[in-house]
Image (cartoon, rainbow, N blue to C red):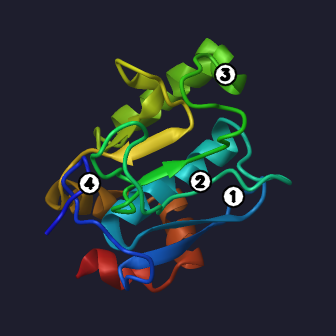
């Protein structure tokens, strides 16, 4: 079985493990095509928090996505998007390779994002923290299924977790299976 950079199995278009997550942000509802279950839930959870605490994730330009069948740019390694364990938010505002873009010019936004990722126990990495080419639009799962399931079960009990599950009712059973 072929895997993406983070060692999660690749998902082809139409795979039953893909889910269109509804993100019910108070700033505007949007959707992301991600892996079902715990990994998708964790990314959806972060996307909801991000849209309400960092910057809205909607607008006239469709620049937010998850699953994509492709390699990492300028590499042959399958992207974490290929396993549906990565998402890009507000890509037009945060172009690949640029630093301190948009809201990330504010240290308070970066500090808030880092604090949230720590509270999520390190299951997601932000592309703005890459050592090489920065990717401030990008967020990816960096832990295995066991760690992700444990964190998803913890977060699904929070108010934000309950909102995500209310908008995606079929996913509770997938997370708990």
Q: CA distance from mark 2 to mark 4?
A: 25 Å
Give whichever of discs 3 and 4 has the lower sequence position: 4
Give whichever of discs 2 and 4 has the lower sequence position: 4
**x, y (%) of residue 114?**
44, 27
Q: Is residue 37 above or below residue 63?
A: below
**x, y (%) of residue 177?**
23, 82
Give whichever of discs 4 and 1 has the lower sequence position: 4
Q: Residue at image x 67%, y 15%? A: 105
Query: Circle 1 sits on which residue?
Result: 25
Q: Which mark is residue 110?
A: none
Give whichever of discs 1 and 2 has the lower sequence position: 1
Q: CA distance from mark 1 to mark 2?
A: 6 Å
**Mark 3 Cα-neighbour bin, 10 Å: few <14, some 14–19, many ≥20:** some
Q: Residue at image x 60%, y 13%? A: 107
Discs 1/3, front: 3
Query: Circle 4 sits on which residue?
Result: 4
**Camera-nearest residue between 103 and 175:** 103
């Amino acid at each position: 079985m072929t895997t993406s950079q983070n060692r999660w199995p690749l998902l082809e278009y139409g795979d039953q493990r893909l889910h269109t997550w509804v993100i019910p942000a108070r700033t505007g509802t949007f959707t992301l095509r991600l892996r079902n279950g715990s990994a998708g839930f964790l990314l959806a959870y972060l996307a909801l928090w991000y849209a309400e605490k960092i910057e809205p994730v909607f607008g006239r330009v469709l620049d937010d996505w998850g699953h994509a069948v492709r390699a990492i740019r300028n590499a042959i390694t399958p992207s974490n998007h290929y396993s549906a364990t990565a998402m890009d938010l507000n890509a037009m505002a945060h172009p690949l390779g640029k630093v301190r873009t948009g809201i990330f010019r504010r240290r308070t936004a970066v500090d808030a994002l880092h604090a949230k990722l720590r509270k999520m126990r390190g299951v997601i990495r932000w592309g703005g923290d890459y050592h090489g080419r920065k990717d401030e639009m990008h967020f990816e799962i960096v832990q295995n299924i066991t760690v992700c399931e444990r964190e998803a079960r913890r977060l699904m009990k929070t108010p934000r977790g309950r909102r995500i599950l209310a908008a995606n009712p079929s996913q509770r059973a997938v997370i708990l299976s």
